[in-house]
Image (cartoon, grey):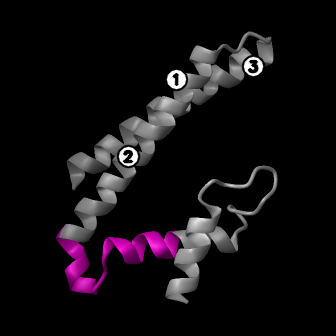
Amino acid sequence: MQQQHEKVISEFREWAQAYADCCRNADKGITSREDFAHLMSETFDLTQVAQQFIHIAVKNHGGHYAMTEDDVYCSGFKKNNDRGYYDEEPVKSPYADYINNLLNRYD
């Protein structure tokens, strides 16, 4: 778990650097497709390492709390839905319908 936690921290730092670089270049008016692609790649890497952390944590400790990965994701989707993260503005999430179906199934 500690090793996976360190991976999350490392990926977050890489994402933060890519985000700062992209913003800095945007402020200068020189953002390129490569800058944006690098930022999206780092964002994806961060989500993957976080999902792996959830998998390992639930595998090691979820049984004690009668918790599954689905419980974690559904709880997260519900929390973010309540916060309005999947609303249509400014851009409707491509996952909005999927998430709403999950929320309706577990309510």
Q: Report x, y in % for residue 67.
A: 31, 81
Q: Is residue 68 left or right of residue 16?
A: left
Depth check, mark 1 against mark 3: the one in front is: 1
- The residue singled out by tag 2 in the image is 48
Report how far apart the C-alphas of labels 1 and 3 lie in the structure: 14 Å
Mark 2 / mark 3, whichever is N-terminal: 3
- The residue singled out by tag 3 in the image is 26
All told, the count of numbered labels is: 3
Q: At 76% from the left edge and 50% from the top edge, which residue is drawn? A: 91
Label 1: how many residues lie within 10 Å, few (<14), some (14-19) or many (20+)? some
Q: At 73% from the left edge and 10% from the top edge, which residue is drawn? A: 30
Front residue of this view, candidates 85 and 12: 85
Residue type indicated by callout 1: His
Numbered mark located on residue 38 in the image: 1
Magenta region, main secondary structure: helix
Q: Report x, y in % for residue 89.
A: 81, 55
